[in-house]
Image: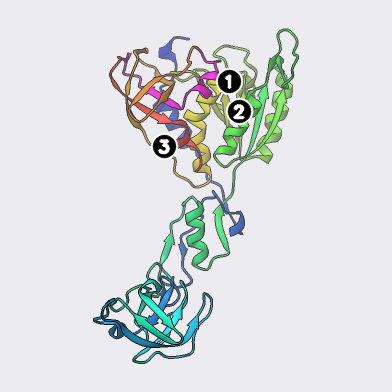
Amino acid sequence: MFLSEFISIEDAFKIIGSNQVVNDYETISLDHAYLRALGEDAYSYHDSPPFDKSAMDGYALMSKDTFGASLNNPKYVVLIDEIGAGDLSEKEIRDGEAIKIATGAPIPKGADAVLMEEFTVLNGNNLEIHSQITPMENIAPKGEDIKREDRILSKGTLLKPAELGLIASSGHDKVKVYKKPKIKLITTGNELVKPSKRIKKAQIINSNRYTISAMIKSVGGLVEVEHCKDTKDEVKIAILKASNEYDMILTTGGTAISEGDVVVDVVKLIGEVLIHGVAIRPGKPFGFGKLENTPIFMLSGNPSAAISQFDIFVRKYIFEIQGLEYNPPILRRESKVKIPSTLGRTDYIKVSSDDEYVNYSLNKGSGIIHSMVAGNGYLIIDENNEGIKKGDVANVILFRSMELS
């Protein structure tokens, strides 16, 4: 096929986006909510802190009892009690009195400040004060961080460590989240075998099984893998069964732009092929279709091309099926080399980038998986460009920014 017969990457994005589905919700324990997407706005059950608390170890007292105190002009109060973390005192502080207090403990009645222990000397129950403090000094007031019934997190928020801590401190032990997508990965090819120290002539190790399944997991998907020979019946049975049990299907192999490619032909027979061939490099023979409401992403058998196709088209879909936005930042970097391209085609070039410059990774074909290990991102050349010159500033997306983290 000529390049003009492929659809543009933007048209491919529109077709896939118009067929985006979003999973239902489930309620799970907070213990299992790491890297899940919140299914509803979350509100606090409590003030945080729930009481005026000490911000450090020291002495709770009336601030006026410290006014004018210094090393050369100490003031004196009497110690009447002690409060540890998790404890409280029933005693009320009056003029000339103090209570020893631990960080996080409730401020006793009558006190309006906490004096740091470093500015005192304790002799029996007599406390010598060497510094003055102001009202509310070293006190975290009730509700300073969160007030009861405040909205603390919005629907669609990815629950990372800080978010989990916030939602726990607000009184939640369970959360409503989007269900993780169940994904069937079907690799195809008569030549593919499991990893082994010895393989026969014409055999190729099935690396896609491991790379693509790991990429699915990196964006929160639950994956099951099956391998099929290049027969229509075997592929048809696998896809039909998977369409009834999984939220989406990924295949590798059998997508070349020619007649007789098993996967594409099977999807045409039992479902609908919406995309077959996109003007990109690498990965032109990308396919997308559906069987009733189950989306099917058809990736190349070439390992590096399949990885690029996943990054370009599949990652965003898996993010959004579980209620998450997908917007990896586009960085601007100066190219240290000339990189040619072709008008009408969008290139995703594997590169190595630092904070200023970008350079070629090993990049000599769709099958060169080593380039993914050697590089740390993609340099993108859009379809209206014939390439970039050395010294040009180019768009770069780092691999790490595309993961669920």
Label 3 element class: loop
Residue 405 visible, this angle: yes
CA neighbours of label 3 inside 10 A, class few (<14), some (14 to 19), many (20+): some
In the picture provided, is 356 more to the left or to the right than 208? left
N-term-proximal mark, 1 vs 3: 1
| Residue that mark 2 sits on | 211
Reply above or below: 323 against 11. Answer: below
Marker count (numbered): 3
x 58%, y 20%: residue: 303
The one of 138 and 394 positioned closer to us in this rendering: 138
Q: Give the percent coordinates (x, y) of residue 238.
A: 71, 29
Rounded to the nearest whole Å, what is the CA distance between mark 1 and mark 3? Answer: 23 Å
- Say which quarter of the image contains residue 114: bottom left
CA neighbours of label 2 inside 10 A, class few (<14), some (14 to 19), many (20+): some
x 35%, y 74%: residue: 119
| Residue type beneath disc 2 | Thr
Range shown magenta: 365-388
| Residue that mark 3 sits on | 328
Is disc 1 in contact with disc 2, using a CB cutoff of under 8 Å? yes
In the picture provided, is 168 more to the left or to the right than 113? right
| Residue that mark 1 sits on | 303
Label 2 element class: helix
- Say which quarter of the image contains residue 77: bottom left
Q: Give the percent coordinates (x, y) of residue 373.
A: 53, 24
N-term-proximal mark, 1 vs 2: 2
